Image (cartoon, rainbow, N blue to C red):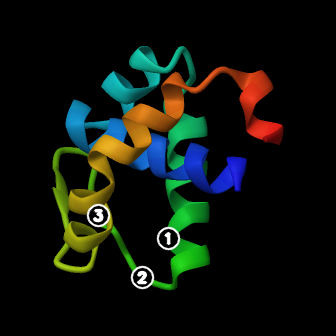
Amino acid sequence: MADDVAELQLFVEIVLAGNLSAAARALNSSPAAMSRGLTALEFRLGVRLVTRTSRSFELTEEGQPVLLPRRPTARLAAAIPPQWSSI
């Protein structure tokens, strides 16, 4: 469950930031780690969530329903103290 929330948080941050580099800075990570996390989420869901090239980044039609209802959920989940995750 915690991994699912982390993947969704990563996805939300990438989309809100507009690119992998900005999301990586926001999450104190690397663009490569962001890319790997996004690829893992896309693989697990079986859909392409974003179209990305070296110069553009766009949410796909399949990515919109994944992002929109979860935007607040991912932000709230990130605020939950780690010790509460076992409850």
User: Where on the picture, by quarter, is residue 17?
Assistant: top left
> The residue tagged with tag 2: helix, strand or loop?
loop
Horizontal side of residue 77 vs 40, given as left or right: left
Residue under label 2: 47
- Within 10 Å of the Cα at label 2, are there few (<14), some (14-19), or many (20+) other Cα atoms? some
Give me the C-alpha separation between circle 3 and circle 2.
9 Å
Tell me if residue 40 comes above or below residue 3 in the rendering.
Answer: below
> How far from the left and from the top, in percent, is residue 10?
47, 41
Tell me if residue 27 comes above or below residue 72 in the rendering.
Answer: above
> How far from the left and from the top, in percent, is residue 46?
51, 85
Numbered circle sitting on residue 42 = 1
Q: Which quarter of the rendered picture does the C terminus lie within?
A: top right
Residue appearing at x 50%, y 55% in the figure: 38
> How far from the left and from the top, in percent, is residue 85?
75, 37
Question: Of label 1 and label 2, which has the lower sequence position?
Answer: 1
Marks 1 and 2 close (CB-CB < 8 Å): yes
